[in-house]
Amino acid sequence: MNKEENHEEELPKLNIKQENEFKKLKLNLEHGAIFPDQMHPDLPPEIESIFLDSIMNFENAYQNVKQISVFDKLGKPEFKPTDALSNEEISIELDRIMDLMAQNGLALDVLCDYEDQDRLIYSFITTELFLHEINDMNVPVMLFNFIYEEFHQNHKYDLEHATEDFLRMFFNTKSDFYDEYHSKDATNHEELNNFRSLFKKFKMKFFKFKDIAFDEQNAKVEFNIDFCAKIKGTDSKISYSGDGKITFEYEYGYWYVRKVVLPIND
C-alpha cells in the first residue's frame, strides 16, 4: 500500500451535517448559491441533504440545457384537429394529453371558466402550446407549469383581482404594506389616506361586483360594498355601505389603480 492510499484511508468520514455544509460550499463556489447561516432549526439534516441534492441536480442539468418544443418533449404524440372531434371526443383527448403532460413533468392551469372550455383548451394546447419552447431538463422533482391566462390574458379576471387586492391592502391596518408600497397609487390618495388614518381597524361585511368595463388602455370597476371601521382610541364603530368604483390604467401588461371612490362621504 503506497502513502497516498494510506492517507486516503486515514481521512475522517463526514457526518451528515458536515456533508450538508460541504454541499452548500460546493453550490456556492460552482453556482453562486447563497444559503442563510442557519437553516430552519427543526429541519432534519436528512431532509436538508435531499433538498441540497435537488438543487445540485437542477444546477447540473441547467448547465448544458437545450431548448425543445412542448410537442417534442411529449414525444411527438398523435392528435386530431379540433374540428375533427365531437364534444365527447374532445374531453377524452384533452384528458389524454393532460395525462401525457403530467407524465413528462408538465402541467397546465386554467384560472377562469370559459364557454366550451374543453374545446378551447384542447385547441390551445395542440395549436399553440405544442409549438412553445422550454428548457429540456429532466429533474425528477421539477414540474414545469403553464397558465393559460399568461398566453391569453383575461382582463376581467385581472381587474377583479386587482380590485380585491387593493381593498384588502387598504383595509388591513395591521400591515405596513399599503403604507410603504401602495398609499400613493390613486390620484386621490390624500383623501383616502386621511380617511384611513382615522381608524384602528376595518371589517368588510359585504362585497359584490356590479360592472366591469375596459378598453385597451382604461378600465372601470363598479361594486357594492359594506364595511365598518373602528375609531382610534375608542370602541365606537362606523358603518359605511353603498356603491364604490375604481378606475385603472393598463401599462406594461398590468392594470394600475388610478382613482378609488368609496362610499365614505355620505
Image (cartoon, rainbow, N blue to C red):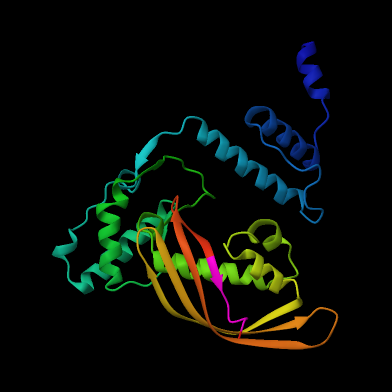
From which residue to which does the magenta span run? Answer: 259-265
The quadrant holding residue 113 is bottom left
Identify which residue, 23 or 119, lies in the foreground.
119
- The x, y position of residue 54, in whole percent, is 60, 44
239 lies above or below 72: below
65 lies above or below 163: above
Q: Tell whether 73 sits left or right of 161.
A: left
Q: Tell whether 77 sits left or right of 46.
A: left
- The x, y position of residue 77, in whole percent, is 26, 51
Q: Is residue 111 visible?
A: no
Q: Tell whether 164 sits left or right of 204.
A: left
The quadrant holding residue 34 is top right
Residue found 80% across the figure and 35% down from its top: 14
58 lies above or below 120: above
For the N terminus, the image quarter is: top right
Magenta-span inclusion, residue 253: no
Q: Tell whether 106 sits left or right of 246.
A: left
- The x, y position of residue 37, in whole percent, is 81, 42
Identify which residue, 177 or 134, lies in the foreground.
177
Residue found 25% across the figure and 60% down from its top: 123
Q: Is residue 80 visible?
A: yes
Identify which residue, 145 or 2, lies in the foreground.
145
Magenta-span inclusion, residue 262: yes
